[in-house]
Image (spheres, rainbow, N blue to C red):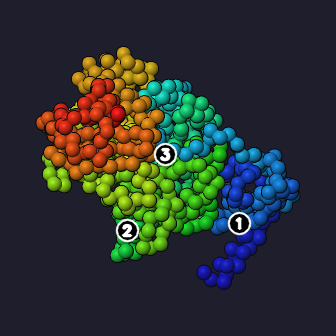
Amino acid sequence: MSTKSILSAIFVLLLAIPELFAQPISIERVEPENWWTGFNHPEVQLLVYGDDIQSAKATVDHPGITLARTTLVTNPNYQFLTLRIHDKAEPGTVEIEFERGDYSYTHHYEIKERSSDPNRNQGFDSSDVIYLLMPDRFANGNPDIDEIPGMLEGVDRDNPNARHGGDIRGVMNNLQYLKDLGMTAVWFTPTFENDMPSEYGAYHGYAATDMYRVDRRFGTNEEYAEFVQKAHDMDLKVIMDMIHNHVGTHHWFIKDLPTEDWVHPIEEYGTTNFRTSTVMDPYASEYDYSATVQGWFVVDMPDLDQRNELVATYLIQNTLWWIEFSGIDGIRMDTYPYPYKGYMAEWVWRVLDEFPNFNIVGEAWMPNTPTTAYWQTGFPSPDGYESYLPSVTDFPLYGALTAALNEEDGWDTGVSRLYETLGQDFLYTDPFLNVIFPGNHDLDRIFTVLGEDYDKYKLALTFILTTRGIPQLYYGDEILMTGGGPDGLKRKDFPGGWQEDPINAFTHEGRVQLAEETGFPVVEAHDFLTRIANWRQDKEVIHNGMLTHFIPQNNVYVYFRHDDDETIMVVLNASDETQTLDMDRFSELTEGYPSGFEIISEEVVRLTDTLEVAPRRAMIIELAE
């Protein structure tokens, strides 16, 4: 640029300054909208957004609260104010004064007292059974919010990739159904605003456009907090789904980025290679590693750069805000290995430092046990990484389960896959905190995967509900819902969630109708799951008892859950023939028990020299003296 051009630019700027200071101060957003006293970390970073807000000077004069620093960035529409909340600060309204020339503006910022309710932020563990649902596909409790003026997508139930109108009120209306089913915790996919164009199919919630607001087509922030309170009143826990790897292209701050390094440039990195093993691979190239963590998940989800401290603090505070605001008991973090792992460790540590009873499960969709165990706290990683993460999703066990029931018996095939996979549990710090599942919203339905074979279904569900770990079921598993292939077909509407539905599977009568329509044993499946899940609730031996298993023979897998008070024998006969078990093999655990009560059939079983097990049958036997 020439000297003449520079002088011209300065002259134009000088001419603009009087007009600039003649403009009233306008603030569009302050995030987070409030904060609390009593956090271990005494500072809160406020993102202040408004037209040329940087030209307004902020001051704070409030007992116990000081303005520690002001951070200005390249975009003049942002400034970041860091408030320090001292130990003696009282809850109340903090007046933040903004001044520019002859104009001033007072923003009233509320500081609240943290809740002391012991029923909030309880965490979740192996005593729980989690019910995963997608709010858009579960039940429509308030049709009046299906179409919101100004939002980019309405409802089209005929399109599997469009919004269908389910909402928070619909979930709330059916909590008793989940309670009766034997569930103890509810996790549903994100409720953050996803105001994306219809072609992106953002009904799933993973393309946030506002991380501090429930999507108005789901309800309101207050309604979400009401849902959590109602769940707690019914002794149900709530797990919130979060995403810190990316947001949607229509997120409000993506449209006017605070800094150039707020997100990774797609022009440079493209989309991710999905090879998350590069994060721990000692031989990974820098090129491949960068493509994993800096590439966008998909083209409509900008990838956040958590190396930017403003971004990292924004995300951490957003999590703390939702936990304290709503009272949730846990978080499932989506795409856990994709952000910078140093940031993820800091995030977990901050959350658990403030909420020590809380639990977090990271979605670590990894190909095998070692690469999954890497992400759980305490893993002795050669690179020295400490994740602090308590729970991981056990995709290796899911893969073993579906293979075990779909392939021929062999030395390392059939149910031997379960035996061999669990045999690698020494790699986990605490495998009992692994979240285990027969399916989820990203996978084909378990009944479909198993060829719509009800006997295989019972074997799968029996295993999930009796082995180590935290069981998670997917909505509709209990009524043998089918679906596979494109995502929308894995996420069909729960029948009866909409007033116009001809069949209501929330009721026994509706399940009878569904059985007649599909030809599947829907009533039996629902009763089967209900029986085991409710039985499991009071079984400490299933929650935390030792697991001892025996080498499978003839595609029969036998394992025991046992503690000082009780012993449970589980038999999974995945073969097509009746198998006669030699009970002497199991004498180390059955000695002194002449009989047992079989939970599924509700029959007394004599434990003599042999035990006959029908083809493709599951048995759960409470041993009795």
Q: Choose the circle earlier in sequence order: 3 or 2.
A: 3
Residue that numbered label 1 is attached to: 71
The secondary element bearing badge 3 is classed as loop
Alpha-carbon span between mark 1 and mark 2: 35 Å
Residue at point 36%, 40% (across, down): 567
Disc 3 packing (10 Å; few <14; some 14–19; many ≥20): many
Which residue is nearer to you in this view: 551 or 370?
551
- Can I make out residue 260 in this image? no
Residue that numbered label 2 is attached to: 278
Q: Is residue 187 above or below residue 6?
A: above
- Can I make out residue 219 in this image? yes
Residue 167 percent location from the top left of the image: 51, 32
Alpha-carbon span between mark 3 and mark 2: 30 Å
The secondary element bearing badge 1 is classed as strand
Q: Amino acid at mark 1?
A: Thr
Residue at point 44%, 64% (across, down): 379
Residue 610 percent location from the top left of the image: 18, 37
Q: Choose the circle earlier in sequence order: 3 or 1.
A: 1
Residue that numbered label 3 is attached to: 125
Which residue is nearer to you in this view: 417 or 271?
417
Residue that sits furthest to the bottom in the current view: 3
Q: Amino acid at mark 2?
A: Thr
Quick check: marks 3 and 1 in contact, CB under 8 Å?
A: no
